[in-house]
């Protein structure tokens, strides 16, 4: 009988142990990874694979306190008999009166990234422990990480990233950098003086003519810089533009051309190309005509933009003459309607006044107008500027917000922009605060009330665990006691003696 009871107890314990081992096999607790900027908060979740026969559990959070500040932690499980998290110890626990199955996201922890934390990855792990009664269930814990990023503020002027070299128009350009991490931005600023002018351009317009000339084949010009500024060195070049050529063709019995009103120079001269006695280019009418054809000219005028004439059915023309007046007084042709549209030709040199500089067409039309830049003289057109450039005057007192502190100019420019450098936390009741050593900015936060309850919850967990262990020991002792007693009684009873008949 004693052997039978002990066998049953052994089988029962093996079944319990086997059941716990099977239910916990392959349990994995994974702490997820997140990205977060300096000064921001981030919530990290912990998930476990499905695990049955769980009566209690615990968590221990490990992280780098020089980079992160633990804000709170909470269990994401349904209706536990007990659940708490002690932020001061980075630990928490939960318990149920009977075994349950846990699966998925069971715990979340919130961090605040410190404003002086270095950029990059920092490891975070929420180590999960699970139990069935007083038996630990095997759990494989996988750590996560928080990648600290930067809230870029591309306001810092440094010469680390060159955008373009200096020219005679502008000084060198550089890219703004982030005042927090130093990363290169997309916008640029000018810092430094313009380079010297390079007078190597040959521009043959009247703006660079050494002296006024007319009706010459060559003339002297001043070399110019790419910015349009005129130099002192000279060069010779074609000056045929200086002729005053007519806009309309001049005609004689042999050909047609454009003539200079000053010297009679002919440009684009060409002989007449006759068709039925009429030049197809200038409408000149040959007096010879066609020998076998007698012209019969229509009495009405035929006209185009160049003039008017009488025309024969063969195409021959006579009495050609240019129009007179906007509406020709002879044929009534309106030359104003046929005038070609004016095309602006802007001079390459700058025209200036006190307000700015621009390029101007001969008709008075302006383009590329811009206000003067630079100090003393405009860096674009060279115009003397009487007003001086604004010089930043930064306040001696700090301006600040949660992200950092700076000295402020009345124009809005921020100087000495930097993040806060905090000292140790000071606790006052249910609040704690810390002060920036540079600008005295105070960072204050409320301590969650869960910390007060955590000790009593922790004590309750200990009592429940102790009571369970004592109950288990008492139960086993009772079984052993009754087994021994039963065995002793059986040993004291005399076995009956069989009687045999003689």
Image (cartoon, rainbow, N blue to C red):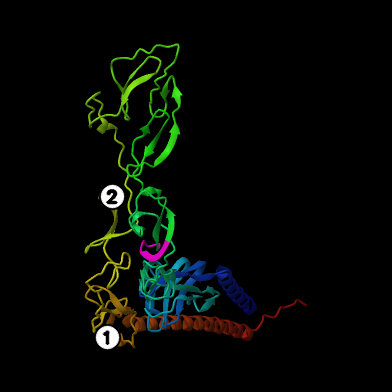
How far across and how far down the image is residue 43, in percent?
A: 40, 70
Find numbered disc 2 in the image and state the secondary structure of the residue it sits on: loop
Q: Is residue 14 left or right of residue 51?
A: right
Q: Is residue 337 above or below residue 165?
A: above
Looking at the rendered structure, which numbered label has been put on residue 216? none
Q: Quadrant of residue 341?
A: top left
Query: Which is nearer the N-term, disc 1 or disc 2?
Result: 2
Please give the name of the residue rendered at 50% of the width and 80% of the height, measured from the top-left corner.
472
* Residue numbers of the magenta segment: 225-234
Q: Residues within 10 Å of mark 2 (few under 14, many from 20)?
A: few
**Is residue 107 at least partly visible in the picture?**
no
Q: Nearer the viewer, residue 476 or 45?
A: 45
Q: Nearer the viewer, residue 106 or 124?
A: 124
Q: Nearer the viewer, residue 325 or 132?
A: 325
Please give the name of the residue rendered at 58% of the width and 84% of the height, measured from the top-left corner.
484
On the image, numbered disc 2 is attached to which residue?
A: 362
Q: Is residue 6 left or right of residue 85?
A: right
On the image, numbered disc 1 is attached to which residue?
A: 440
* Residue situated furthest right in the rendering: 502
How far across and how far down the image is residue 28, in percent?
A: 54, 70
Q: Nearer the viewer, residue 271 or 64?
A: 271
Find numbered disc 1 in the image and state the secondary structure of the residue it sits on: loop
Q: Quadrant of residue 250?
A: top left
Q: Is residue 71 left or right of residue 28?
A: left
The quadrant in which the C terminus is found is: bottom right
Q: Is residue 261 above or below residue 58?
A: above
Q: Is residue 357 above or below residue 246?
A: below
Do the residues bearing badges 1 and 2 touch, measured as CB atoms within 8 Å? no
The stretch drawn in magenta includes residue 298: no
How far across and how far down the image is residue 211, in percent?
A: 34, 58
């Amino acid at each position: 009988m004693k052997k039978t009871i002990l066998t049953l107890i052994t089988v029962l314990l093996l079944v319990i142990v086997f059941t716990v081992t099977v239910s916990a096999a392959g349990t994995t607790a994974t702490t997820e990874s997140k990205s977060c900027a300096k000064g921001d908060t981030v919530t990290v979740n912990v998930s476990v694979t499905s695990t049955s026969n769980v009566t209690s559990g615990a968590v221990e959070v490990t992280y780098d306190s020089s980079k992160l500040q633990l804000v709170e932690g909470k269990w994401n499980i349904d209706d536990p008999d007990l659940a708490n998290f002690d932020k001061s110890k980075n630990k928490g626990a939960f318990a149920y009166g009977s075994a349950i199955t846990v699966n998925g996201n069971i715990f979340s922890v919130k961090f605040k990234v410190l404003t002086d934390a270095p950029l990059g990855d920092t490891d975070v792990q929420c180590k999960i422990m699970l139990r069935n009664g007083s038996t630990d269930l095997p759990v494989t814990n996988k750590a996560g990480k928080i990648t600290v990023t930067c809230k870029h503020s591309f306001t810092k002027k440094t010469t680390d990233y060159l955008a373009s070299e200096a020219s005679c128009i502008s000084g060198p350009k550089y890219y703004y950098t982030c005042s927090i991490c130093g990363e290169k931005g997309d916008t640029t600023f000018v810092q430094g003086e313009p380079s010297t002018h390079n007078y190597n351009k040959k521009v043959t317009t009247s703006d660079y003519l050494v002296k006024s000339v007319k009706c010459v084949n060559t003339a002297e010009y001043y070399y110019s810089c790419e910015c349009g500024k005129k130099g002192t060195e000279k060069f010779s070049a074609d000056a045929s533009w200086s002729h005053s050529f007519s806009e309309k063709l001049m005609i004689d019995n042999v050909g047609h051309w454009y003539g200079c009103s000053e010297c009679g120079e002919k440009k684009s001269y060409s002989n007449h190309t006759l068709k039925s006695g009429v030049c197809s280019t200038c409408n000149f009418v040959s007096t010879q005509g066609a020998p076998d054809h007698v012209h019969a000219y229509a009495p009405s005028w035929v006209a185009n933009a160049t003039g008017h004439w009488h025309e024969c059915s063969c195409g021959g023309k006579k009495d050609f003459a240019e129009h007179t007046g906007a509406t020709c007084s002879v044929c009534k042709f309106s030359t104003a309607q046929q005038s070609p549209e004016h095309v602006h030709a802007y001079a390459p040199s700058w025209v200036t006044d006190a307000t700015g500089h621009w390029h101007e067409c001969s008709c008075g039309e302006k383009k590329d107008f811009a206000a003067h830049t630079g100090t003393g003289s405009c860096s674009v057109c060279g115009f003397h500027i009487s007003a001086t450039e604004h010089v930043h005057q930064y306040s001696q007192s700090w301006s600040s917000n949660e992200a950092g502190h700076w000295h402020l100019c009345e124009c809005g420019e921020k100087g000495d922009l930097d993040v806060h450098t905090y000292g140790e936390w000071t606790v006052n009741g249910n609040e704690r605060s810390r002060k920036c050593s540079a600008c005295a900015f105070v960072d204050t936060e409320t301590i969650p009330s869960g910390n007060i309850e955590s000790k009593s919850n922790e004590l309750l967990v200990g009592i429940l665990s102790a009571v369970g262990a004592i109950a288990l020991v008492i139960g086993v002792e009772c079984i052993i006691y009754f087994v021994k007693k039963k065995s002793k009684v059986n040993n004291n009873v005399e076995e009956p003696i069989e009687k045999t008949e003689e």
